[in-house]
Image: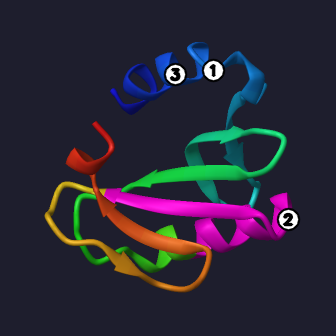
Amino acid sequence: FLYAQLTPQFHYRPELNSVFFQYRTRGGAFVPLAWRTEKQTIGLIPSLSETPSRSAIQSAQSFIKANGPSTKVAIVHTGNSMRKINSAIGTIPMVALI
């Protein structure tokens, strides 16, 4: 659903040269939706709870480590609150992305 909502935005701005991808490791880290532009890499991790699981945070940390210092991760949930976990990881309600 989020992929269908977000990709058209990049078609209207072809100068961003965005690439969409997934991130997986053998250790179990998983970021199902990510995109890279020339300036930044962003990953989205879905969560049913407003409080991110330890697994989601570890996946985010692995993704950031693999993609460099300009990487950000949003843990997307169905609740209402936003929370900053650290300078590169935060939680955001799904409705804020739509």
Q: What quarter of the picture does the C terminus occupy?
A: top left
* Quadrant where the N terminus is found in the figure: top left
Element on which disc 2 rests: loop
Compared with residue 29, is residue 91 higher up or lower down, i.e. above or below? below
Residue 68 shows which numbered tag?
Answer: 2
Out of 14 and 89, give the one closest to the viewer: 14
Front: mark 1 or 3? 1
Does residue 48 show up magenta in the picture? no
Q: Residue 43 location, x and y as percent?
A: 59, 51
Measured in 3D between alpha carbons, the distance from the residue under mark 1 to the one under mark 3, in whole angstroms, is: 10 Å
- Disc 3: CA contacts within 10 A as few (<14), some (14-19) or many (>=20): some
The residue shown at (15%, 62%) is: 79
- Numbered badge on residue 7: 3
Q: For marks 1 and 2, give the one nearer the viewer.
A: 1
Image: magenta residue range: 58-76
| Place of residue 86 in the rendered image (x, y in percent of width and height, measured from the top left) | 55, 86
Amino acid type of the residue that numbered disc 2 sits on in the rendered structure:
Gly
